Amino acid sequence: MTPLLEAVGVVKTFPGVRALDGVDFELRAGEVHALLGENGAGKSTLMRILAGDHVPDAGELRFDGRPVRLASPADAIAHGVRLVAQERALVPTLSVGENVLLGRLPRRRGRVDWGAVRAQAAELLARVGLDVDPATELGLLRRDEQQLVEVAKALSDEGRILILDEATASLSTSESERLFDVVRGLRAHGVGIVYITHRVGELASVADRVTVLRDGRNVLTAPLAETSHEGLVEQMVGRRLADLYPRARPEPGEVRLRVDGLSADGVCSDVSLEVRAGEIVALFGLVGSGATEIPYAIAGDVSARGVVEVRGRVGLVPADRRSEGLFPQGTVGRNIGAATLGRYGPAGIYLRGRETAAARRQIAALDLRPPRPWAPVAKLSGGNQQKAVLGRWLERGADVLLLSEPTRGVDVGARAEIYRLLGDLCAGGRSVLLASSDLDEVVGLADRVHVVSRGRVVSVLAGDEVRHDRVLEVATR
Amino acid sequence: MSRFALRAARSPELYLLVLLAATLVWFSANNPFFGTSANFTGLAAGAAVLGVAAMGVTVALAAGAIDFSIAGTIALSGVVAAWLDTRVGGVVAILGALAVAVLVGIVNGTVVTRFGINPFIATLATAGTLRGLAFLVAGSSAGIVIEDGPIVTIGQHEIVGIPVPIVMFAVIAVLGWALLAHTPAGRALLAVGGNPEAARLSGIGVAGAQRWAYLASAGAAGVAGILLAGRTGSGLPQAAAGQELLVYSAVILGGTSLWGGRATVIGSVLGILFVETLRNGLVLERVSPYWQTILQGVFLVAAVWLVRQQQLGRDPVWLAQRIARRRRSPQVEAP
């Protein structure tokens, strides 16, 4: 049988980076082909080539065995390719219904047929199980709801190839299940689906075959049944998994952070916890539980009631690096020095050289790469950007670090580095409060896990109880 | 309350309408001449000139296309119309002025989309060039006098008792509304303004949409320039100087976003009427010109603040619900 889509020997080079180095990929009708890889492995580049957004430097794309050249997204759409992008490709100021049908609004005598827009959108939204009025403005929806709108949009006409990029990243378990149902339904109709993810665990629910990319080459293509979870992750990372959560657990010291009865409207209610020197305490909750917003309430970014006692200084590492953590136009040095500007010179004068020197010290301590204070921070990998944010607080002398989703959108290799760094910081006597919806890292790192559901701490697990099954069981109860 | 009524009650346009009505009532109560039909007709005809320009600005802002050269375009098209009128004749003059405006739109669109220059800077730069060209064509700051003819007709005459500028404003407003609300092209403009990346991935040409947007704003400014020349009976090179800010405040006041993706023609019409009513009322109150500009600024900030509250959901419905809730439970929890 001729494959629906073939990519043969695809090469794509960006200034300074060979993103794809002769990649082969094949998609058959009626299969779900998972595409795995770390950030920077080339999976998003490959995806954008398939969607007509990038043109490959060399190699060939074939649809139904015939070579084609995709010069624009419109070309790919004409060939039946539908992309559900990770960066939400939606227009926040337009209605949900119009977003679903964007670029192909039904028309009657040259005019937009709003009745048809409503009806068609409502039907598609029902298919993905999203119960909202199509007339609602899109920007008012939650992240996870917007993700489902993306999927509905991709279903809006007869696509033959559906590319899902990290589609479950912001979905709850039940919403993911519904998405998988939709995917299985499409597969039964003969649609070929490229499923891009970093959640290896969920592949079993949907994927038929899997391809792993690493450093721009495909290192593995195999039926899912012939692979194992650990095997896939090791192929992605290119090293053994046991090294991912290395952590010395020093004897905890004095209490550094004590929170008692903290409540903030719409975020949390009656949260109490303690973090000692040398400890990593986790707040775990599924997406929407409020766990990842609690650090903001503790840091005072959200107005809250209750008691927060801190011995030392607090630093908040926000969840969204790009919009909350970084000064994206700035250099690494500026990002590291931003919370301590008054220190770089006498009498309120700011001397850039002193900031640069300070940044050099943090760069060395954090092993930030490239090790240059004047490198533009936007060019750094996600993991190194996160180090720059951490460096800012370490430069300020923070003893208590509040982290919210520190590894969201960070690839596995860089994660390992962040985990090691957190371990080192604790070994050095600092305290870490880690709010995360990533079960693996919570279980791998934390001394204690406060499980959060609907803004409340429903259980505190410690010692032997910090296991995947226990945490998840409590969180979903 | 039905869902439709609730949505209407929360719409920014209604809010602005109430604001406008309050202003009208206030000035009518204070000045016997303000409420006369002669004053209203004059007010509306004056508003029509900037109103036409505001329609172009609204359509352009839908696509996120900022065009600060509209005042220059108004002046240049007026002067070109006058210059051609004295040499070739009225109809050719109108067509020629429109052609100049279209050319300006093409240049603006090309500079922004092809050269990738920030629209703010690019159109401020072309604004200066256009103003200079207007002086060059006019030859002096006294301008060029237009004799009776087609241009004066559309500037000063009436159709069934309504001044032509008002009729043209109404027609262009209806066209603008239909374009944005009911045509695929208009929706494409809004999509491009709301999220260019999403539009591109949906197969909509972003640069093309933006070029059309600049064409719309320059074209409308060209029409406004001809209307203004007709009303004043001359092509003045200093015409409409500084008025681009008035037009933009009126459009933003109406609920259109300066950052694209959200545009309301009805809001812009109300915004222009509000701004012009304010100006007219202050003139009739014999407020000194210095104080006029000061008060206009103060009122505009206040109005924009009020509309902003509305956009944040703090609208009359919200206020009513809040008061009702307070009444039901007088004891508010202490923090």
Image: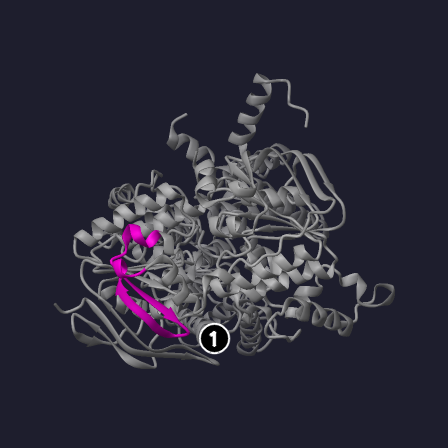
**Residue bearing the label numbered 1:** B111
Q: Position of residue A321 (x, y in %)?
A: 56, 58
Q: Residue at x 59, y 53 (%)?
A: A318
Q: Position of residue A230 (x, y in %)?
A: 39, 59
Q: Residue at x 64, y 22 (%)?
A: B332
Tag 1, which secondary structure? helix
Is B70 or A460 nearer to us in this picture?
A: A460
Q: Position of residue B259 (x, y in %)?
A: 51, 57
Q: Is residue A222 magenta?
A: yes
Residue A56, compared with residue B154, is above or below; it is: below
Is A296 or A443 nearer to us in this picture?
A: A443
Is A142 or B5 nearer to us in this picture?
A: A142
Residue A430, compared with residue B144, is above or below; it is: above
Q: Is residue A95 visible?
A: yes
Residue B50, compared with residue A257, is above or below; it is: below
Q: Which residues are magenta?
A: A202-227
Dividing the picture into quadrants, the one containing residue B104 is: bottom left
Q: Is residue B161 visible?
A: no
Q: Residue furthest right?
A: A347
Dividing the picture into quadrants, the one containing residue A174 is: top left
**How many residues crowd mark 1 within 10 Å: few (<14), some (14–19), many (20+)?**
some
Q: Is residue A218 magenta?
A: yes
In this picture, residue A3 sits left or right of residue B81: left
Q: Amino acid at mark 1?
A: Val
What is the basis of the colouring in this image? one colour
